[in-house]
Amino acid sequence: MARHDRTGMPAKRFTFPKSRRLARPVEFDRVRATGRVQRGRLLVLSVLLVNEVAGFRAGFVTSRALGSAVVRNRVRRRLREIVRKHQREIAPATWIVTIARASAARASYEQLEAEWLRLAKRASILATPC
């Protein structure tokens, strides 16, 4: 059943589909080899401008240094939600790889979001101000 907003009309979908995600190791390697890197206390943001007509694509790295699979998946879900929430502000034709540092496991959602936005602004990938 479709969700409806207050006007009774179907709500606009604000999803982050798998087609927007980087998944293959070759894609991650390309961003790592030729992209710009912004380092923070909780996250590392690698950005590559590509010659694609489509919008941005994003990938996430959560290593075992973060902790158990439960912790890694929680951090990954939070990072995906941050990108999904701000996807309309991200410049098109951009590949983004977000790498979580060990300290990200102890950070709140708000701390991760503030760090990601700070690094994204520094990398100049936000098309509109937040």
Image (cartoon, helix red, strand yellow):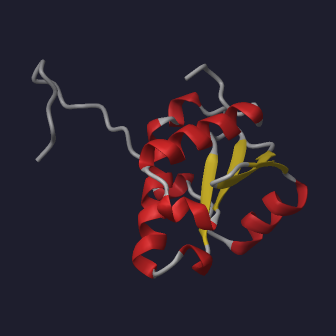
Q: Classify the position of the C terminus by image quarter.
A: top right
Q: Residue at x 60, y 43 (%)?
A: 116
Direction from residue 77 to residue 52 in the image, left or right = right
Task: Please give left or right for residue 75 compared with residue 23 in the image.
Answer: left
Q: Position of residue 67 (x, y in %)?
A: 51, 78
Residue placed furthest toward the right? 34
Position of residue 106 relative to residue 116, above or below, is below
Left or right: 77 in relation to 117: left
* Residue 89 image point, x, y percent: 57, 28
| Residue at 77% from the left image edge and 37% from the top image edge | 123
Residue visible at 61% across and 59% down?
59
Count of numbered tags: 0
Residue 94 drawn at (x, y percent): 71, 42
Q: Tell me the residue at 63%/61% (across/down).
A: 22
Residue 105 or residue 38, whichever sits in front: 105
- Relative horizontal placement of residue 126, taking residue 110 as reference (left or right): right
Residue 28 is drawn in which quadrant?
bottom right
Classify 89 as above or below 71.
above
- Residue 51: image quadrant is top right
Front residue of this view, candidates 76 and 110? 110
